[in-house]
């Protein structure tokens, strides 16, 4: 019996490890991504307002070595260099985000900042001139500080304030920008910023505010989508959606309780935001049940998870033209009864998260390439095979090497699993975005953790960018649109002995060479 299961396990591993030589569909698009606070710098010039990340980093004690994004990659001044790098990579699109406070220093549309508008116009025009399509994220975490002073994402008014900002951006840039993303990773900025306090604005309310903030963010997303859909789509003809992030959650064992726990873990992360938009509408049933049960045990009179009215649920449902997915890593999930004394989104899940100690790793990223394929299949099965755009995927390191073989390996295997999901499983994946164009301000890890295809020297005021091996890998991957069959390997053939002195047999003719061609 043990022998049999070992054979079966080996067969499964062999399948996962098999490399698929094939190309992506013709329509497949390749891109790289960045975000405003992580690259722009110029935090207080030309009329830009403060964002919560300016406040959070300047407060001290929040980020590694008390670093800030004050200068970062200085892309505010060096965007032309960035465009050149993109052109060299040959990517189809560039995903970047708008600094809300650079455009609207108070966060409100009545006081726009012309220098900010000029900056993004220049960037967009330079991209188009270089043949690179802009893909714009409206919110990649740098909320204008003035809006945070008014309650930030806890404030229900943010639904309309965000909508007005979105409309402002569509009006200004929508003639040239045809791909919009409302929010980047609500799960991360909400749980980190309002749950654990490890991101701006640094609040710690893991049992309550995480849920009420998510409620506001989902409504804000939906209003922006409706605005685009009704007011801009008819003339601008672009697409707009949301980017959600998720690990793949693999059951720790084949115990049905662990299998159910792994499913629950995904529902508490991806499903939290995806079910209202792409699924059956509203929060996942398992979240509603668990959080209500825990809340009552903890002495609350009602669930800590707010409820949508039927009207709100309908208004949110279907508000994404694509499924934007950020994915980095995988974990193992085991069922567990969590002590319910402390209200927390982590305890609400009733799971324990583990990893496999044999997995290759770097910082918080464990290299489990088949996890991405499993996740893409889960999304396809759960939400009716939506069209997925992978808006981030990448690998970190904490040294400044240009020979980043581990990152090349990561990209090679993860993109190959995207290919398998498309070709072998029928998942409708339309594009892939590598995180990130260049080393940049990696949030709480600042400059100690690097994800870039290009190295950036943060000691040098010029912030020079230098391609790493991974940049060359991505360039080739894009040029080939995947992994064509490897070139035939022609074994060395000993020269045949010339007996009769016939010069014709010295050169090996083409058909004989062909006989030696073999597939890898
Ligand atoms: C994403 N985690 O953030 C963001 O969209 C990027 O801005 C960021 O640079 C990139 O991934 C790499 O970290 C995450 O702790 C930050 O699980 C943290 C986590 C996940 C995603």
Image (cartoon, rainbow, N blue to C red):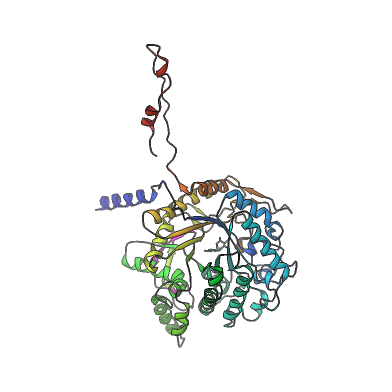
- Furthest residue to the left? 1
Q: Quadrant of residue 332?
A: bottom left
Reply above or below: 290 against 93: below
Residue beneath the point at 66% across and 77% down: 109
User: Ligand 1 sits in which quadrant?
Assistant: bottom right
Residue beneath the point at 57% across and 83% down: 156
Does 85 sit left or right of 113 as displayed?
A: left
- Furthest residue to the right? 46
Find out whether residue 336 is within the magenta segment: yes
- Furthest residue to the bottom? 301
Q: Is residue 68 visible?
A: no
Find out whether residue 225 is within the magenta segment: no
Q: Quadrant of residue 510?
A: top left
- Furthest residue to the top? 500
Q: How many marks?
A: 0
Q: Position of residue 96 (x, y in %)?
A: 60, 62
Reply above or below: 128 against 344: above
Reply above or below: 107 against 38: below
Q: Is residue 70 visible?
A: yes
Q: Position of residue 33 (x, y in %)?
A: 57, 59
Q: Position of residue 172 (x, y in %)?
A: 64, 70
- Magenta span covers which residues? 327-348
Dominant secondary structure of the magenta stretch? loop
Q: Position of residue 2 (x, y in %)?
A: 27, 52
Look at the image and tell me in which quarter the C terminus lies: top left
């Amino acid at each position: 019996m043990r022998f049999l299961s070992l054979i079966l396990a080996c067969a499964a591993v062999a399948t996962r490890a098999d490399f698929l030589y094939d190309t992506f569909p013709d329509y497949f698009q390749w891109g790289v991504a960045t975000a405003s606070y992580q690259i722009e710098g110029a935090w207080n010039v030309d009329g830009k307002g403060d964002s919560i990340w300016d406040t959070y980093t300047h407060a001290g004690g929040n980020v590694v070595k008390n670093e800030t994004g004050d200068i970062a990659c200085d892309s505010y001044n060096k965007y032309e260099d960035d465009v050149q790098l993109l052109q060299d990579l040959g990517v189809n699109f560039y995903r970047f985000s708008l600094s809300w406070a650079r455009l609207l220093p108070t966060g409100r549309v009545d006081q726009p900042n012309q220098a900010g508008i000029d900056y993004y116009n220049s960037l967009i025009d330079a991209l188009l001139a270089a043949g690179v399509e802009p893909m714009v994220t409206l919110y990649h975490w740098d909320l204008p500080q003035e809006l945070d002073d008014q309650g930030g994402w806890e404030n229900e008014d943010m639904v309309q304030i965000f909508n007005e900002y979105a409309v402002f951006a569509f009006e200004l840039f929508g003639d040239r920008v045809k791909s919009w993303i409302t929010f980047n990773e609500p799960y991360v900025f909400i749980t980190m910023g309002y749950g654990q306090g490890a991101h701006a604005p640094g609040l710690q309310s893991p049992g309550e505010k995480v849920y009420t903030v998510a409620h506001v963010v989902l409504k804000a997303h939906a209003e922006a989508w409706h605005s685009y859909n009704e007011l801009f789509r008819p003339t601008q003809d672009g697409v707009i959606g949301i980017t959600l992030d998720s690990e793949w959650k693999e059951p720790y064992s084949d115990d049905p309780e662990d299998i159910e726990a792994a499913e629950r873990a995904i529902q508490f992360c991806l499903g939290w935001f995806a079910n209202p938009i792409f699924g059956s509408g509203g929060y996942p049933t398992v979240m509603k049940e668990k959080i209500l049960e825990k809340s009552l045990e903890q002495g609350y009179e009602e669930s800590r998870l707010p409820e949508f009215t039927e009207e709100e649920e309908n208004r949110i449902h279907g508000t994404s033209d694509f499924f934007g997915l950020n994915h980095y890593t995988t974990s193992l999930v085991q069922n567990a009864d969590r002590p319910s004394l402390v209200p927390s989104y982590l305890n609400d899940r009733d799971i324990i998260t583990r990893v496999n100690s044999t997995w290759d790793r770097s910082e918080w990223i464990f290299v489990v390439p088949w996890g991405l394929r499993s996740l893409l299949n889960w999304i396809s099965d759960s939400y009716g095979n939506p069209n997925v755009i992978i808006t981030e995927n990448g690998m970190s390191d904490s040294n400044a090497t240009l020979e980043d073989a581990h990152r090349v390996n990561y990209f090679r295997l993860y993109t190959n699993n995207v290919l398998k999901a498309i070709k072998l499983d029928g998942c409708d994946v339309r594009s892939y975005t590598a995180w990130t164009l260049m080393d940049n301000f990696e949030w709480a890890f600042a400059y100690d953790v690097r994800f870039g295809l290009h190295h950036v020297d943060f000691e040098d005021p010029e912030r020079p960018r230098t391609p790493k091996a991974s940049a060359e890998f991505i360039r080739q991957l894009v040029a080939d649109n995947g992994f064509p069959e490897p070139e035939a390997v022609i074994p060395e053939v000993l020269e045949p002995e010339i007996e009769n002195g016939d010069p014709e047999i010295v050169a090996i003719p083409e058909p004989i060479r062909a006989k030696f061609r073999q597939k890898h």
